[in-house]
Amino acid sequence: MSEEIKKQYSADSIQALEGMEHVRMRPSMYIGDVGVRGLHHLVYEVVDNSIDEALAGYCDRISVSINEDNSITVEDNGRGIPVDLHKKEGVSALEVVMTKIGAGGKFDKDSYKVSGGLHGVGVSCVNALSDHLRATVHRDGKVWEQEYERGKSSYPVKNIGETDVTGTIVTFKPDATIFQQTLEYNYDTLASRMRELAYLNKGIKITLTDKREKNDDGTFVGEEFYSEEGLKEFIKFLDGNRERIIADVIAMEGEKNGIPVEVAMVYNSSYSENLHSYVNNINTHEGGTHLSGFRRGLTATLKKYADESGMLDKLKFEISGDDFREGLTAIVSVKVGEPQFEGQTKTKLGNREVTAAVSQAVSEMLTDYLEEHPDDAKTIVQKVILAAQARHAAKKAREMVQRKTVMSGGGLPGKLSDCSEQDPEKCEIFLVEGDSAGGTAKQGRDRNFQAILPLRGKILNVEKAMQHKVFENEEIRNIFTAFGVTIGTEEDSKALNLTKLRYHKIVIMCDADVDGSHIATLILTFFFRYMRELIESGYVYIATPPLYLVKKGAKKEYAWGEKERDALNESFGGSATIQRYKGLGEMNAEQLWDTTMNPEFRTLRRVTIDSGSEADRIFSMLMGDDVPPRREFIEKNAVYANIDA
């Protein structure tokens, strides 16, 4: 190191950033990212404040509005944020809450027993990442207001009127210099979260209004979410597209060992297990001690009942925990005063005391239900026995997959055109629809880091298939083998081991037509049900081939949509030749590389899971047996579809 560089690195080089400045400098540390997910997370943080007021018993109405300029307004009828002088800070308590990271009533257990919010940074973080924020407080008969610019107050808190109600109104506009990808809020994403919160907190009315769009009658698009039965209604909503095999939803709520526990579950005719867990309204998709407690209570109670019933006497092998959860949809929600989160995304509960509380609650609930509903109990045990038999068949099929993986020396699938690079972080694989498009992709790819796996026709719909049928399917076996992953243990037949995954970019590349969309959905259903870890790790993408080629003389441009096509045609003088690509096979290798595979110019859409419960519901609706909900979904969203003659 030279003397000049040594001199440059001194005490003056160390930046001691204050809280709000640090949020603006490192926003992803506080809200996860500065893309679409982080943008929506700002709304959740503000709404969580209102939910906490509701949990404390002071609020039963929350309204969220997406304004015309994509700003957000959140209003509640809680107590209103205190506005009196904060002795330590020397300014209004409202200003402290809005401008100091870590300030708020949630740290005082006399004010809030439990509080939500994934990161616990609250409205001050939202303020720091907003171009403008206005807080209006109705409290003590008066209306108070303060505005902020990028986290800094524009003027002291002032009294602007009188009122006979209480509550807080927060309006904010995200900062375009922070959220450079997009500032546009997605109504469906916000609606999904508001619906979830209404089910998790029964008795609270949450309204969502989109002032950017109007209905035919001139009113703004919007919905009201309210639940009287909580998780019981949530289960009915999630499982509405599946055939229930027992009479009713099994549900309970109560307090065990000082921990409020709410559980709801139902058995259906499907072959998938769908468990959703929450801690203080946070979706803990990585699970944790509350989910362990649920599984322990469920398995022990059902096993005891099945043994005592004598229905297992003729079974020649042991029942496993997996067997008790096939066809089960369940929601576990706990409220914990001091939650300890683990895992990469801080969504795995670590509090050990919660395991026993949930296990005991589930055991008592199930014992009572099985005794009072003997017919349902018999149906559940029969389902468990069938699951056990299928698991043994699936184990043999899995072993066949394992024997054919690279690690066991079985070799790669014959159709796979592999790349020469060995570092998984640099490698990508394209799952291509059909041999014809696969051949074009092989010619157009960069062989150094791009692999091609053609898929023959439409792969198996795993939503309707038993597990052993999934593992026996040739196309699915080829995917497992090509990826180099191992699957299944005795404890968890769907556990996926990614330690030897050969590609860290898995790209679904299908035709831009109805059949292509169906194939992509089939692949995504398979990934969600059997390789969900790939999606959660950020490895799954969808390619976006162009829809049109616009040509005039020597000039040519590609278009990915109708507006882009029309704009190009106009720029070419209005008499261009327009070619509509109905399939990847219609492009030559050079065109496919230029538009869809070249990392410098292509657009890949990363597949993410914003809400596991909503994804579960959508996949069961689109790919399950129940036709009416699927028809309703298609009719509602048909405006987005491209229908080819």
Image: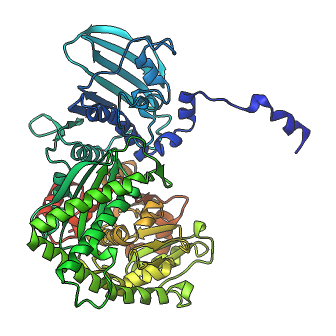
Say whether residue 131 is left or right of residue 335. right
Instruction: Compare residues 474 and 331 and report the one nearer the observer.
Output: 331
Q: Is residue 194 above or below residue 405?
A: above
Name, please, the residue furthest toward the right.
3
Q: Residue at x 42, y 33 (%)?
A: 122
Instruction: Compare residues 323 and 135 and report the one nearer the observer.
Output: 323
Percent across and percent down for residue 600 are 55, 58
Say whether residue 470 is left or right of residue 253. right
**Image quarter of the C terminus:** bottom left
Q: Is residue 489 visible?
A: yes
Percent across and percent down for residue 46 are 35, 33
Percent across and percent down for residue 160 are 30, 8
Say whether residue 506 is left or right of residue 476. right
Q: Is residue 38 above or below residue 452?
A: above
Percent across and percent down for residue 300 are 29, 70
Instruction: Compare residues 285 and 514 and report the one nearer the observer.
Output: 285
Choose top left, top right, bottom left or bottom right for residue 585. Answer: bottom left
Choose top left, top right, bottom left or bottom right for residue 612. Answer: bottom left
Q: Is residue 574 above or below residue 73?
A: below
Number of on-image labels: 0
